Image (cartoon, rainbow, N blue to C red):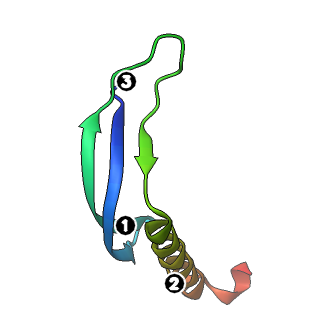
Amino acid sequence: MKTYTIEIQKFKAASNNIHGQMLLKVDALVSPKAPVEGIEPSTILTLTEANARVLMALLKAQLLEFDSKKARSRF
Protein backbone atom coordinates (compact mmCIF):
# COMPACT_ATOMS: atom_id res chain seq x y z
CA MET A 1 0.00 0.00 0.00
CA LYS A 2 1.30 3.46 -0.85
CA THR A 3 0.97 6.05 1.90
CA TYR A 4 0.89 9.82 1.57
CA THR A 5 0.72 12.99 3.59
CA ILE A 6 -2.04 15.21 2.19
CA GLU A 7 -2.16 18.82 3.37
CA ILE A 8 -5.34 20.67 2.41
CA GLN A 9 -4.55 24.25 1.37
CA LYS A 10 -8.04 25.39 0.29
CA PHE A 11 -11.49 23.96 -0.35
CA LYS A 12 -12.86 25.27 -3.66
CA ALA A 13 -16.22 23.55 -4.15
CA ALA A 14 -18.41 20.63 -3.21
CA SER A 15 -21.06 18.75 -5.19
CA ASN A 16 -22.94 15.46 -5.34
CA ASN A 17 -23.08 13.14 -8.32
CA ILE A 18 -25.73 10.70 -9.51
CA HIS A 19 -23.90 7.76 -7.90
CA GLY A 20 -24.45 9.06 -4.37
CA GLN A 21 -20.90 10.34 -4.03
CA MET A 22 -19.77 13.68 -2.65
CA LEU A 23 -17.07 15.43 -4.67
CA LEU A 24 -14.77 18.01 -3.05
CA LYS A 25 -12.55 20.23 -5.16
CA VAL A 26 -9.41 21.19 -3.20
CA ASP A 27 -5.95 22.63 -3.48
CA ALA A 28 -3.63 20.25 -1.64
CA LEU A 29 0.02 19.34 -1.20
CA VAL A 30 0.50 15.59 -1.60
CA SER A 31 3.80 13.92 -0.74
CA PRO A 32 4.80 10.28 -0.29
CA LYS A 33 5.12 9.14 3.32
CA ALA A 34 7.69 6.56 4.29
CA PRO A 35 6.26 3.68 6.34
CA VAL A 36 7.33 3.52 9.98
CA GLU A 37 8.50 0.12 11.26
CA GLY A 38 5.96 -1.51 13.56
CA ILE A 39 3.13 0.92 12.77
CA GLU A 40 0.30 0.11 10.37
CA PRO A 41 0.76 2.25 7.22
CA SER A 42 -1.79 5.02 6.81
CA THR A 43 -2.25 8.11 4.69
CA ILE A 44 -2.43 11.29 6.79
CA LEU A 45 -4.81 14.17 5.96
CA THR A 46 -3.93 17.49 7.62
CA LEU A 47 -5.89 20.72 7.59
CA THR A 48 -6.11 23.92 9.61
CA GLU A 49 -8.96 24.69 11.99
CA ALA A 50 -10.31 27.19 9.45
CA ASN A 51 -10.28 24.56 6.70
CA ALA A 52 -11.89 22.04 9.06
CA ARG A 53 -14.74 24.50 9.65
CA VAL A 54 -15.13 25.02 5.89
CA LEU A 55 -15.20 21.24 5.41
CA MET A 56 -17.91 20.91 8.08
CA ALA A 57 -20.05 23.56 6.37
CA LEU A 58 -19.59 21.94 2.94
CA LEU A 59 -20.45 18.49 4.31
CA LYS A 60 -23.62 19.78 5.99
CA ALA A 61 -24.75 21.51 2.79
CA GLN A 62 -24.10 18.44 0.65
CA LEU A 63 -25.89 16.13 3.10
CA LEU A 64 -28.93 18.42 2.97
CA GLU A 65 -28.79 18.19 -0.83
CA PHE A 66 -28.69 14.36 -0.61
CA ASP A 67 -31.70 14.44 1.73
CA SER A 68 -33.67 16.74 -0.55
CA LYS A 69 -33.30 14.27 -3.44
CA LYS A 70 -34.63 11.29 -1.45
CA ALA A 71 -38.24 10.27 -1.89
CA ARG A 72 -40.41 11.28 1.07
CA SER A 73 -41.36 7.63 1.66
CA ARG A 74 -37.74 6.86 2.60
CA PHE A 75 -37.80 9.10 5.71
Residue extending farthest to the top is: 37
Q: Is residue 58 left or right of residue 8?
A: right
- Image point (37%, 24%), residue name: 1
Q: Is residue 47 left or right of residue 6?
A: right
Cα distance, mark 2 to mark 3? Answer: 34 Å
Please state the horizontal and vertical placement of residue 39, each as a whole percent of the image: 53, 18
| Circle 1 Cα neighbour tier, 10 Å, few/some/many (<14 / 14–19 / ≥20) | few
The correct choice, above or below, for 43 with respect to 48 in the image is: above
Cα distance, mark 2 to mark 1? Answer: 13 Å
| Element marked by disc 1 | strand
Which numbered disc flags the more N-terminal residue, 2 or 1? 1
- Image point (50%, 65%), residue name: 49
Q: Quadrant of the C terminus?
A: bottom right
Q: Is residue 36 left or right of residue 30?
A: right
- Image point (62%, 85%), residue name: 71
Q: 35 or 63, which lies in front?
A: 35
**Residue on which disc 3 sits:** 1
Amino acid residing under circle 1: Leu
**Residue on which disc 2 sits:** 65
The correct choice, above or below, for 23 with respect to 37 in the image is: below
Q: Is residue 60 left or right of residue 19?
A: right
- Image point (43%, 47%), residue name: 45
| Circle 2 Cα neighbour tier, 10 Å, few/some/many (<14 / 14–19 / ≥20) | few
- The numbered dot on residue 23 is 1
Amino acid residing under circle 2: Glu
Which numbered disc flags the more N-terminal residue, 3 or 1? 3
